Image (cartoon, grey):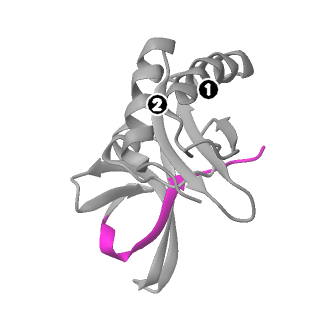
Amino acid sequence: MKVKPIAEIEEVARRIADLTGVEFLEAEFRTSPRAELNVTVDTEDGVDLDTLEKFHRAFDAALDELDPTFGEPYTLNVSSPGLDRPFKTPRDFERAIGEEVEVRLYSPLKGKKLYEGFLADYDGNSVTLDCGGQELKIELTRVAKINKAIKFD
């Protein structure tokens, strides 16, 4: 299936996000097993169903004009980032400073591949965790995945 460049789709998504009061996080087009455009949006306080629907309706109308698949059918899915979404952008890291995070490494560091702590700093190349009063700086090249820690009571 022929699809317009994702950058073109993201440009429209950002414009609609600004108009509807949400933050555009990412878009991904999958063609297998069926064609679908998955878009993730968020707000400072999280997103509810009404917010997702508002963005979906506005973005769907804009996509009709853009015609990203040149007339071929596809499904549009709009969702929140979810609790375990990995950090992907500098904005993801910056928003999480002070929050408890979980860091999975490709190979052990000080004998461990999994660290939990509070994200104390992010400089674009590394993260610094506060692990119970001790700081640990980890280069991003070592990180397989970092996301907010999920705690169940």
In the image, which residues are magenta? 137-153
Three-letter residue code for mark 1: Asp
Above or below 143: residue 72: above
Q: Is residue 37 left or right of residue 15?
A: right
Residue 17 image point, x, y percent: 47, 22
Q: Can residue 98 be seen by looking at this rendering? A: no
Q: Give the total of numbered labels.
A: 2
Q: Residue at x 50, y 21 (%)?
A: 22
Above or below 153: residue 49: above
Q: Nearer the viewer, residue 142 or 18?
A: 18
**Which numbered tag is attached to residue 60?**
1
Q: Is residue 33 left or right of residue 118?
A: right
Three-letter residue code for mark 2: Ala
Q: CA distance from mark 2 to mark 1?
A: 10 Å
**Which numbered tag is attached to residue 20?**
none
Q: Residue at x 54, y 32 (%)?
A: 41
The answer to which of marks 2 and 1 sits earlier in the sequence is 2
